[in-house]
Amino acid sequence: MIRTMSEKEILQTRQAHLSTPFAYRTMQEVEEKRNQTPDLPHRHDYFTVLVVEQAEGVHQIDFITYPFRANTLYFVSPEQIHHVTLRPPAPHGHVILFRPDFLQEYSISPAQLYDLDLFFNCNENGPLELTADEITRLLPYIQGIADEYLSEKMQKWEAVGAWLKLFLLECKRLKAAQKIVSKTWDKRQSEIVKQFKNDVERYFRADHKVNEYADRQHLTANHLNEVIKSETGTSTKDFIQNRLLLEAKRLARYSNLNAKEIAYRLGYEDVAHFSKFFKKWEGVAFTEFREKTDL
């Protein structure tokens, strides 16, 4: 019989928690604290927006390494594994942290947040690279967030939530503008993709087949695949399998669960089937991947 474990047990010692519903810090403040306490790859129970105006180093998110670039935003969702490595000179930028319950009470619902297409619990969404003029458009919102957060004014959290919503909406506009420039925009296809991504995030552990996601949108599997392939460059099957693989890798590297327990968590009743899936999609056996010490 498979033993049920709490999330605290599963994630060993690399789970970071936010003691308050919302926090704002400069990148330099965060780096000074990290110099006192070595930073290891970890996952959060909150959302993070890293606004880099200037920095040298890399940001690793779910096994993908992104070099820091000026005027770039990095969005990290709860449960994503990430790790920051910085080099001199001192970084210049901002770190905005907020828990789902803060959004629910003071800003927007978690569902609305995912509709913004900024946060996604998978490596399908990369950093948002902006121009110097575009990052300048965001700074008043960030300043508003910081000023209210550091104040003791009446209804300060409502004000922080309002500034946060404006900031996220402006990020959405900047990202959408890049999409419009890069390809013809199709609103209906965009809605199909958005729901598919949200459905995968919600159901990937139980539903592994394309037709299960097509049925939710009253589409044929072929039509759904055509839309997803056109909009993301990835087939529906590959998208689902990649999400399963990512979660398997997270649990393999950052939990004490064995292969059988991980297989069960991801909807596989047969560990041999899970092992075959892992080897096919990752290119190495599960045990070999787990034994690696480097990310």
Image (cartoon, rainbow, N blue to C red):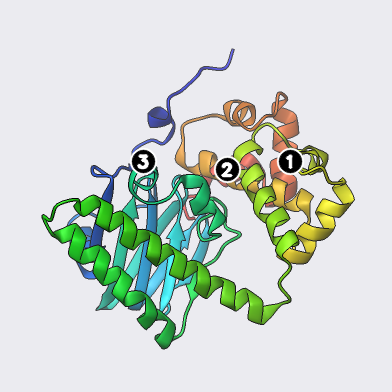
Residue 101: image tag = 3
Q: Is residue 27 visible?
A: no
- Of labels 3 and 1, earlier in sequence is 3
The residue under the point 73% across, 30% down is 272
Marks 2 and 3, the one that precedes in the sequence: 3
Residue 208 horizontal/vertical position (percent): 74, 38
Place residue 178 in its image quadrant.
bottom right
Instruction: Kindly identify the amino acid type of the residue bearing the numbered disc 1.
Output: Phe
Q: CA distance from mark 1 to mark 2?
A: 13 Å
According to the picture, the residue beneath numbered tag 2 turns out to be 247
Q: Amino acid at mark 2?
A: Glu
| As drawn, 102 above or below 150 | above
Residue positioned 41% across, 87% down in the render: 133
> In this rendering, does residue 201 appear at all?
yes
Label 3 vs label 1, nearer the camera: 3
Residue where numbered disc 1 is placed: 277
Q: Position of residue 242 (x, y in %)?
A: 67, 50
The reply to whether the C-beta atoms of the residues labelled 3 and 1 are less than 8 Å apart is no
In the rendered image, which quarter contains the N terminus?
top right
Three-letter code, disc 3: Asp
Q: Nearer the viewer, mark 1 or mark 2?
A: 2
Q: Could you tell me which secondary element the residue under label 1 belongs to?
A: helix
- Disc 2 on helix, strand or loop? helix
* Alpha-carbon span between mark 3 and mark 1: 36 Å
